Image (tube, coloured by chain):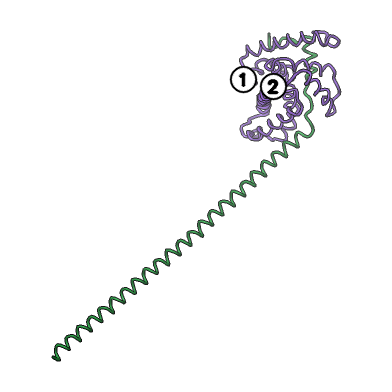
Chain colours: A green, B purple
Amino acid sequence: MDDLEPMDDFERELQLAMRRRPAPPRLKSKVINELWENAHRASHRMVWFERIAATFVLAGVVSGAVLWRNAEERQRGVEARQQVFTALRITNRALEEMNAQLQARGRNAQ
Amino acid sequence: MTGPWKPDLEDLLDEHQSMVFSLALRMTGDRGLAEEIAQDVFLELDRNLRKIESPLHACHWLRRVTMSRSADALRRRRVRSMDMWVEIDEHHGAIFGERPNPLGSRIESLLATLPESQRAVLVLRYQEDLTPDEIAATLDTPLATVKSQLQRGLKLLRAKAATHLKEFVRGA
């Protein structure tokens, strides 16, 4: 079949019968609406994603602050205990010195 | 000097919706399905708008995607018969302000009975006025296959028309 072979009567009838048909009038508005809804859904999804991300960041910050505060208090407790022990050691040493002096005086008096 | 062509979906819709809808309608024989296919094709066009380089490219892209989507839809819905086509067409064929065309409807009915590959080349040849080369490029099929399908399809359609459309067709 030659590409440019002239059409016969039947082919001309066929071409006439197969003219393009008008699209439904609502087709364009349906496509535009669908595009708008897709864009709206995408922005809605983005808002939710941002909210979830913000929640995670906030939860991270709060739990970090709580952990930092606990660690700080624990450190302060350890320092206070060390100070008490130091004070006890000093007291103990003072008492031992006092006791030694008393024993020396007792020996001198005898 | 004019800048590079910038495709606008609304303009492309105005220009090509009739072509896309008619191709889908003639391939599937179902107005509802054809409308869905046309809608999907234009939504896909919107997603690929940046790749479209010229008005000609847009037209070729739309034809190719419409034919491919129609073939997919037909694969999903293999339950068509000529009676069903005629029934649907008679009920919905004359809407949207068209003038009723009995010969057109009957030729379309006969076209619907042809094998899908032959129907595709005939629709592109006689609705879109494409050459066999252009049809081969649109359907991504070898030129020899297109030519043989065109010949066989036309022969089959002539034979069917000779039997069913004696009162209308002189050249059949």
Give the structural element (helix, strand or loop) at label 2.
loop
x and y, in percent, of residue B18 in the image:
76, 27
Image quadrant holding the C terminus of chain A, namely bottom left
Q: Based on the displayed image, in which of its 4 quarters is residue B110 positioned?
A: top right
Q: Pointer 1: what residue?
A: B140
Q: Amino acid at mark 1?
A: Asp
Q: Dot 1, crowdedness within 10 Å: few (<14), some or many (≥20)?
A: few
Residue B56 visible at all? no
x and y, in percent, of residue B122 in the image:
72, 16
The structure residue drawn at horizontal position 33% and vertical position 71%, both measured from the top left corner, is A82
Residue B100 or A15: which is nearer the viewer? B100
Which residue is the extreme one toward the bottom? A109
x and y, in percent, of residue B19 in the image:
74, 26
Give the structural element (helix, strand or loop) at label 1.
loop
Q: Based on the displayed image, in which of its 4 quarters is residue B130 positioned?
A: top right
The structure residue drawn at horizontal position 85% and vertical position 28%, both measured from the top left corner, is B97
Q: Which mark is residue A106?
A: none
Classify B88 as above or below B164: below
Q: Pointer 2: what residue?
A: B78
Q: CA distance from mark 1 to mark 2?
A: 23 Å
Question: Disc 2 sits on a residue from what chain?
Answer: B
Q: Circles 1 and 2: CB distance less than 8 Å?
A: no
Tag in front: 1 or 2: 2
Q: Amino acid at mark 2?
A: Arg
Q: Dot 2, crowdedness within 10 Å: few (<14), some or many (≥20)?
A: few
The structure residue drawn at horizontal position 45% and vertical position 62%, both measured from the top left corner, is A68
Query: Which mark sits nearer the N-terminus, 1 or 2?
Result: 2
Classify A73 as above or below B93: below
Q: Based on the displayed image, in which of its 4 quarters is residue B129 positioned?
A: top right
